[in-house]
Image (cartoon, rainbow, N blue to C red):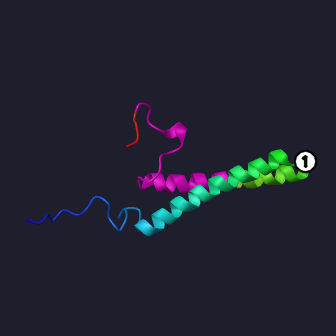
Amino acid sequence: MRSTMRPMTSVEGDPGSGLRTAELSGELRRMALHLETAAVLELRAQRTADPLQVAVLRRRAEQRRQEAARLRERLAACGLALPPRGQRTPGVTPV
């Protein structure tokens, strides 16, 4: 007998979010890229002696972190990313 239940991992993504699975995975990759870029910019700022360049690099790193946070919020609403540490429910372990 064949089951008529749909699989838990739908190809269409979350219907309430308006995003498809391919779009969601792309957003997840973009979030990771922004966080990695922010880390590299911060490292470059630590190695640079020029105070003006340090300020520019740190500002750009912060912009990347802010964009990653916006993407994280969007993904968390779809159940694909954890909310920031300060907004998580204590005692609940992610699956």
- Outermost residue, top side: 91
Measured from the top left, where is residue 68 in percent x and y? 60, 54
Q: Amino acid at mark 1?
A: Pro
Main SS of the magenta part reads helix
> Where in the figure is residue 49, as x and y percent of width and height?
91, 47
Number of marks = 1
Would you say 49 lies left or right of 66 here? right
Q: Tell me if mark 1 has few (under 14), some (14-19) or many (20+) residues whose alpha carbon lies within 10 angstroms of its own.
A: few
Residue for point 32% across, 60% down: 9
Q: Quadrant of the C terminus?
A: top left
Residue 19 visible (yes or no): no
Left or right position of 2 against 32: left
Q: Which residues are magenta?
A: 64-91
Indicate the position of residue 39 as horizontal and vertical percent values: 69, 50
Depth check: give the residue in front, 32 or 86: 32
Can you tell which quarter of the image residue 20 is in?
Answer: bottom left
* Residue 31, visible in the rendered structure: yes
Residue 72 drawn at (x, y percent): 53, 53
Give the side of residue 9 with respect to residue 66, left or right.
left
- In the picture, measured across the screen, residue 71 lies left or right of residue 58, that is left
Instruction: Report helix, strand or loop for mark 1.
Output: helix
User: Is residue 32 shown above or below 90?
Assistant: below
Up/down of 74 relative to 26, above or below: above
Residue at 28%, 58% (x, y): give it.
Answer: 8
Label 1 sits on residue: 51
Magenta stretch encompasses residue 80: yes
